[in-house]
Amino acid sequence: MLNHLEISILLISGYSPRKNALVGLLEDVCGSHTNIQSITNTLEIESEVKTEPELCLLDLANIKEPSLEIINRVKDEFNKSKIIAVHIYSSSLLVDPLFQAGIDGYLTYEPTRSSIKKAFDCVLSNQTYVPADILS
């Protein structure tokens, strides 16, 4: 397993209680000393994020902008960052366009500690992560 303590993570989530819960989950998975920054929408990227994170976690179901626009904005701003999307979709027909837009991994809406670890390990090793139940 990779050392998640040494990575920087940007979480974009529009809903504050959920955002706070996801930050807590990320701290639980990666350690409380991991560099985790959170913003509530992609319009804050230029003003709030000064250095490119290794990993961007996009809570797409809780941001009011269209998912593909969010992915494109993040990719334009951070061309070296790995992107993991979190959404309510459970069908590959709905998840595939997110990968075509450029995400590196996908997590379902209520990710577990285990799925987050697997996703981080995969995408930070330059592999794609898709939960097994999405592939079917």
Image (cartoon, grey):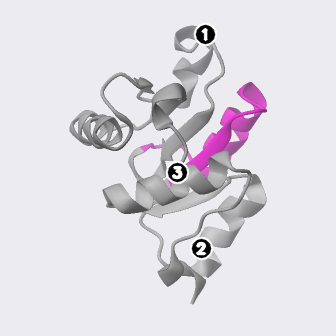
Tag 2 residue? 94
Give the residue type that dot 2 points to. Leu
Mark 2 surroundings within 10 Å by alpha-carbon count, few (fewer than 14), some (14 through 19), many (20 or more): few
Question: At which x and y percent is residue 2?
Answer: 55, 44
Mark nearer the viewer, 3 or 1: 3
Tag 3 residue? 1
Q: Residue at image x 31%, y 37%?
A: 19
Give the residue type that dot 1 points to. Lys
Can residue 59 be seen here? The reply is: yes
- Vertical arrangement, residue 72 with respect to residue 90, above or below: above
Residue 4 magenta-drawn?
no
Q: Residue at image x 31%, y 34%?
A: 27
Tell me where the magenta segment starts and ends, as one range.
63-85
Of pointers 2 and 3, the one earlier in the residue sequence: 3
Mark nearer the viewer, 1 or 2: 1
Q: Distance between the Cα atoms at labels 3 and 1?
A: 28 Å
Give the residue type that dot 3 points to. Met
Of pointers 1 and 2, the one earlier in the residue sequence: 1
User: Which SS class for mark 1?
Assistant: loop
